[in-house]
Image: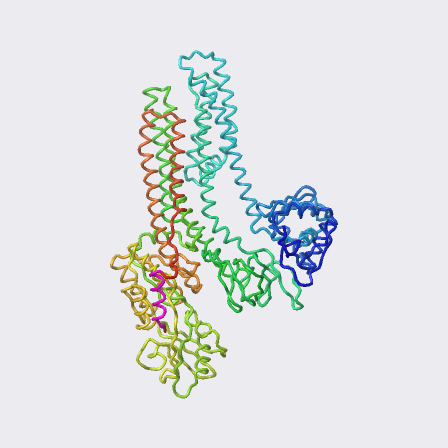
Amino acid sequence: MAREGGCFHCGEPLPADAPTVTLDGAPRAVCCHGCGTAAAWIRDAGLDDYYRLRQADGRRVDAEADDFAAWDRADILAEHSREAIGGREITVLVEGMRCAACAWLIDRALRRVDGVRDVQANAVTGRLIVAWDPDTTPLSRVLQALARLGYRPHLAPGEALERERRRERRTLLIRLGVAGLGMLQAMMFAEALYLDFDNQMPAATRDFFRWIAFLLATPVVFYSGWPFLAGMARELRLRRLGMDTLVATSVLLAYLASLIETLRGGPHVWIDAAVMFVFLLLAARAIEALARQRANAAVDTLARARPALAWRIGDDGRREQVPLAALTAGDTVRVGVGEQVPTDGVLCDDGEFDESLLTGESRPVAKRAGEPVYAGSTCRNAPVRMRVTRTGQDTRLSHLVRLVEQAQAQRPRLAQAADALASRFVVSLFATAAVVFAVWWHLAPERAFEVMLAVLVISCPCALSLAIPTALGVSHGALARIGVLALRPDALDTLARADTLVLDKTGTLTEGRPSLRHVETFAGMDAAQARRIAAALERDAGHPLARAFAGEAAPVADEVRAAPGQGIQGLVDGRCYRLGRADFAASRFDDGMIWLGDGTHALARFVIEDRPRADAVEAVAALKSLGLSPTVLSGDGVIAVGLLAGALGIPQHHARLSPEDKLAFVRSLQADGHVVAMVGDGINDAPVLAGADVSLAMAGGAPLAHRSADLVLTGESLLRLPQTVALARRTRAVIRQNLAWALAYNIIALPFAALGWVTPWLAALGMAGSSLLVTANALRLARLPFPARPEAGTAEARATAAAGDAMMAP
């Protein structure tokens, strides 16, 4: 399979002095001694059929042996492995396992290692399950044998969580299977009883069929229906009647009444209704669980995006694999191709990274040495070295995960209202069923129980309970896929009602990467000294404009104080300086530029450029098409704000506003009856983000802005804004449709059941159909079409480029 002129083992190009290894009596050229050693081992082990069977080249083998000692740590084994017969078992991801021949080779090779009890290699999933005896051999020895063949093992992230979810899914499927099989068999006997129209069946045969159906229904009711029985017990302990109480009561009534009728030889039994009710409800619950799993997939992936181990490079250049907890700021880490970045850090080499988990952007991002890289990104094309800056809970990934977990722990007011309505509906339904039973007892006692049971079953508020949570779960999953995280429970509902959009300028409409274009100095100060003083004052500033001076070597400024909306002041080399607006820094007329002075005299004037985002024009046009009225509020100069707003087609814009001014403007809009959505990113945006009806923070913004926001856009694209608004409105529409259907169904179905026109088994079918319809309607939110980015040459792209050329920002 190796390419002609390439390494016989891995297919890589051969060096001029390529080593050789003898296979099948012929010399085979290999690219390095690592591949030669692997090929020789395969030959000596009698596994050289691998080269004949393989469908893809192997992975290049590093000549330097990797250290897998960290895999033997007790904490790693406790978290990622599990007990098995005769030892322990672990699931690992294998890099380089590309075909069935690879799986065959790994299986045969690892079984030869002492202490290995079982090996299961799956080339389709890339997973390897190894069972071994820790008393005989450590796991690191098994993995070294794997690495000698050119395959690199990785811990499967979230394996314990996945095992628990697989167990839950397996249990649910078993319950569903038992219910389905029991329902079919029980209904087969029930059908025979129904077909005895003239009551010609002998009593002994009738009772035999009933007892068989009853025995078949018992595991369905008490095993398959156990989630509903346990839920009823929980609701009764909490003194809050809900859906599980109604379901369990209906099933137990049908089951026990059928038992009594069988014992006394009564004319009717309702075993078929009990088993059908359990089966259909379990089927609806399984579909709901699948929808919830699909909706949460992106969020779960975000939480598992960090590897358990990392390759640390020591002072002597040797690599060792260590747990993430062992990494500290300043360590140098190697990230291989296809591996995930373990911590936040700064690149030592140029590289390309897939940041789709963090930002929703599908295209890899090229980064140069010295640029930041974040935990959860995936390295592409070539391995890189990075210097660790933040670890553990301080990383950007951990920050996003915490925000998501906080959001998931809260319930929207609408969902709480639906739960309260469902609880009251259950109470009223029990009362209604009692009245129906009493009326029918006087009219036709033989049908009273059957009609009451049909009323309880057909009006079960399952669809009402699913109407809101399912829609919100699917929409949150869709948001996560495009890089938007909802942090407040009512964020989507409020955003769907918003009619006015307020946008910050710097870091929101612009890229937030300002560059220093020109320096004009006064009073004998040179440009280098002016940049040095400005960099000292801006060193720890949270505003994006601080990045314009980030590359300057600067001393530490003392007594630094910020004047919101005006600038910053502090002591540099013992002298007081001010940096900001002309009137604040130099007592001059405000011209929209950044000035350096002592409060009275001007020392320097900085011209700073910050280009608009590439998709800003298209995003603003899309927001307008959704009926939103955009307004720019900025603390920057009048000229810069006007140029940007004009280029983007935003007629409403206000400059030189302090945080208090921005908040007052939003309050005035709210007083006029507008529902205001605010988008910002800086520390000075936090008050207005908190004061708006709904707020969105950009990915690169300050942590305080994130904490004040209702939603966070983890990507750089402004197109996330109209996408999020469109999805919020569709979510609101779907919730209304679900609620309308659930209420209409119960209003229409209840009279039919009360009049005796619906049998219990038909009532169970209608109830399950209603729940499935609500779930299917919510799943439509996952297929929401999103607009594409503007391509080069389009009118939007040209307009954005023109805006960048025309605009200079203070």
User: What is the x, y in percent for residue 286?
Assistant: 47, 38
Q: Quadrant of residue 617?
A: bottom left
Depicted 119 relative to depicted 580: above or below: above
Q: For the image shown, how many numbered marks are present on the structure?
A: 0
Q: Please say whether residue 807 is one of the residues in the magenta stretch.
A: yes
Q: Is 65 or 470 nearer to us in this picture?
A: 65
Q: Is residue 677 left or right of residue 702?
A: left
Depicted 274 relative to depicted 723: above or below: above
User: What is the x, y in percent for residue 704?
Assistant: 42, 64
Q: Is 465 or 595 nearer to us in this picture?
A: 595
Which residue is rendered at x = 64% and y = 56% of the image?
6
Q: How is the image coloured?
A: rainbow
Q: Is 310 or 194 nearer to us in this picture?
A: 310
Q: Is residue 345 left or right of residue 425?
A: right
User: What is the x, y in percent for residue 322?
Assistant: 63, 59
Magenta span of residues: 794-808
Q: Quadrant of residue 285?
A: top left
Q: Is residue 529 left or right of residue 687?
A: right
Question: Residue extending furthest left?
Answer: 672
Depicted 342 relative to depicted 596: above or below: above
Q: Please say whether residue 263 is one of the residues in the magenta stretch.
A: no
Which residue is rendered at x = 46% and y = 17% of the image?
264
Q: Is 453 or 693 nearer to us in this picture?
A: 693
Q: Is residue 246 left or right of residue 14?
A: left
Depicted 162 relative to depicted 600: above or below: above
Dominant secondary structure, magenta:
helix
User: What is the x, y in percent for residue 471?
Assistant: 39, 45
**The C terminus lies in quadrant:** bottom left
